[in-house]
Every structure is written in structure tokens, then in C-alpha cells.
Amino acid sequence: TTVGVIRERHPGEERVALTPEAVTRLTTAEVSVVVESGAGAASHHSDDDYREAGARVADTATVEAADVLCGVNPFTPGDPRPGQVLVGLFSPLHRAAHMRRLQAAELTVVSLDLLPRRLSRAQSMDALSSQANLAGYKAVLVAADTYRRYFPMLTTAAGTSSPANVLVLGTGVAGLSAIGTARRLGAVVTAYDVRPEARGEVESLGARFLELESVTGGAGDGGYARQLTDAERRAQQDELTARLSRFDVVITTAKVPGRVPPTLVTEAGLASLRPGSVVVDMAAGELGGNVATSRPDERFVTEGGVTVIGAGDLPARMGPAASAGYARNISAVLRHLLVDGRVHIDPDDEITGQITVTHRGEPVSPLTADQLT
Ligand code: NAD
């Protein structure tokens, strides 16, 4: 079996699906790796590094002919052949048309974002978590860099600074990482999530849980949040708007799989913040975000002096660390799929059966079957 590593085409994307270290561990008598020239450059892995790790370095067409193709962002090989296996983060719930094209080409598509993350044996494959951990950390550093006061309470000869009040909305993996990072910088942290079980996790990190009355029982399937009703959404926005004004920094991470991210900070909410406040929207992407006016990869300052940062792709800009984590996740998935050196798709396996969107064009995962033909 040949495993191909493509060069990511997405602008600003620094990650690569397999690092040289991962190549070394993956290569066996039956499995060889071929890497597209320049694929690791933005993560500081040169073509020579890959050669030393035992991979071949080749042009696009050669790599795209491999039996298994690994990437980070959604991709389509130039000249796909039936049975070819694509592994990556395809966001299949948002990309039905793309999935149907790959299905029509009779490809096997394995998407790590469909992983049953609560299974302990799936943990090493959890790319959403490895990337969200980095993103939550980086979001706080971006906020701290933009905020023009101290995060910690500091006493110097010039007096005592008061600590920053940080609010984290959405306390999944990214939110918890943000809470920990903001606490380590000395901020006073408050956090909120619709899932009731979030409270304990927030408090164990030394943050205060924000109590809202607008939503009860916000948990959905698989540990994720459910989509709120319109009435709940409006009530949640109103309650949050009323409470935002005392915070200096707001970091939003709220998502619901397959849905447009909920708007948590409205224009009225932004207007209530003090001049100099900073809002980082980690949900900002092609589907929208948690902040009414945020735009992906853009920052602007409101008339009221609040800086709003659309930061949905922070892992893409932490190439070396993000690739190291992602490569371990991809390697674990490949090891799970490879039996005697060949990819074996067992639809009855509780991991394979959920992460495989299509196998040779046949729908497999129950999570995506209804959007395929
Ligand atoms: P995510 O990225 O889908 O969403 C981020 C957070 O936003 C979630 O906590 C969600 O509850 C919250 N959210 C959604 N809508 C909201 C709203 N209207 N208002 C406020 N908050 C809202 O989530 P994630 O980080 O991928 O984590 C999802 C779940 O999976 C969590 O329960 C997490 O603990 C769990 N998880 C478990 C494991 C494991 O058991 N090994 C591993 C990873 C994640």
C-alpha cells in the first residue's frame, strides 16, 4: 500500500497531514509513503527531512495516484480512481455536494471529524480535540496581545493593576483550553455552556460558571450541544447581552455539528462592551460565527472601540504543533484501518463504521448516509 501526503492548497494553511516522525513510524515492509514536494515546508519539514524518514518525495500527479491519500482540509484528487482512500477532515455534514462527487467517483472517504470521540480507543485519533486544544490556547494569546492592559493583577512600584475579566462562551475542548490558558495568565475567568455537565469542568479549572436561565437541557447527541429553538436562541442572546458589559475579553467557541454556529454576541452585546475590550470569535468560518459581525480571518474595531477578531482557523497558523498532533491522529486512524498492510473497511467496527463516509461509493456512516445517494 502507498500512502500519499498532499500539499495543502488552502491559503494560510501551514499544516501537513504526516510529519517525518509519523512517516518513520508508519513505514513497514507493506506500507510506503510518498510526499508531495513542499508539503511540509510551512511546518518546517523539508523534502530532505521526509526522505531521511524513509518517504519518497514526488510531484502532485504521482502523489495523487497513491492508494491512500492523507490531507488536512477537504480535497479531491485530480484524477481519482475507484477504491482510492481519502483520509482527512472533510466536514462532510457541511459539504454534501462535495461528498456526493467523491461518492460518484467511487472513492472511500474517511473523515476524522465523524469520530465517536467518547470511546477511549478512539482518543488517539481525535483530531478535533488535538486542533481545538491548540486553538483555545492561541485564542487567549491573540486576545492578550490585542488587549492593551495586563491580564494578571500586578503590584509594582507604580501601583496595582486589576486583573482582566475574561468570558469564555462554549466550554468544549477549545473553551476549556482557553480557560486554562487565561487562568495561567492571571485573568479572572467566567465561562458558559448550554451543556449542564460543563459546569463541573469549568469550576475544576478555577473559573466561575455563568448561570443563564434561557436554556435548560442543552445537551444533544454524542456529547455535543443540540440546536436551540428560535425562542431559546433569542432568550439566550438577550440574557448574554445583559451580562456582557463587565467583561474585558470575550472568547467564543460555540458550535453544533452540522449546523450554523449560534449567534451569542449580538450587535447590541458588542455595543455594551467598554472601549478597549477584545472579542475573539473562534467559531468564525464559512458558515458564520458566534459574533454577529465577525468575519473569518478579519479583525475590526467597532465604533465603540471594541476589537472583534474572526479566528476560526488558529490551528492552521500553528503549523509545527498542529501538524505534530494531527499526524499522530492520522497515523492512529491508518493503523486502525490497515490489516496486513491493506486498508480494510469493516462497517461493523464502531470506529470505522462511523468515520467512513463512503466505501467505494457506498454510504457507510449513519451520520452522513442521508445526504448521499
Ligand atoms: P464543539 O466544538 O462542537 O462545540 C464547542 C462547545 O460549544 C460545546 O461545549 C457546546 O456544548 C457549546 N455550545 C454549542 N451551542 C452553544 C450555545 N448556544 N451556547 C453555549 N454553548 C454552546 O464541541 P467540542 O469541543 O468538539 O466538544 C464536544 C463534546 O465532546 C464535549 O462534551 C466534550 O467534552 C466531548 N469530548 C469528549 C471526549 C472524550 O470523552 N474523550 C473527547 C473530546 C470531546
Image (cartoon, rainbow, N blue to C red):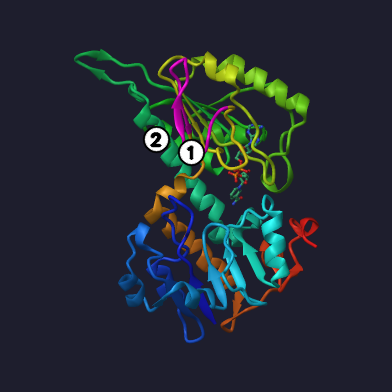
Q: Is residue 314 above or below residue 91?
A: above
Q: Nearer the viewer, residue 130 or 73?
A: 73
**Are the residues flagged by discs 2 and 1 in contact, CB closer than 8 Å?**
yes
The answer to whether residue 128 shows anywhere in this view is yes
Name above or below for residue 214 compared with residue 274. Answer: below
What is the magenta range?
Answer: 293-309
Q: What's the residue at 59%, 35% (across, down)? A: 289
- Extreme residue in the bottom direction: 29
Query: Image quarter for residue 257?
Result: top right
Residue named by callout 1: 311
- Above-or-below relation of 54 to 302: below
Label 1 amino acid?
Answer: Ala
Distance from Cα at disc 2 to Cα at disc 1:
9 Å
Judged from the image, the quadrant occupied by ligand 1 is top right
Residue 8 falls inside the magenta stretch: no
Q: Could you tell me if residue 214 is visible in this image?
A: no
User: Badge 2 is on which residue?
Assistant: 142
Decide whether the magenta segment is chiefly helix, strand or loop. Answer: loop
Instruction: Please report whichever mark, 2 or 1, sits nearer to the chain's N-terminal start.
Output: 2
Pinpoint residue 138: horizontal percent, then vertical percent: 42, 41
Q: Give me the residue at 45% from left, 31% from top.
A: 299
Element at label 2: helix
**Closer to the eye: label 2 or 1:** 1
In the image, 66 versus 161, the foreground residue is 66
Task: Return the x and y of residue 237 as percentages of the image width and height.
Answer: 66, 22
Percent across and percent down for residue 220 are 73, 41
Quadrant in which the N terminus appears: bottom right
* Depth check, front residue: 37 or 5: 37
Frontmost residue, 39 versus 151: 39
Residue type highlighted by circle 2: Val
Residue at screen point 45% across, 66% down: 18
Q: Secondary structure at mark 1?
A: loop
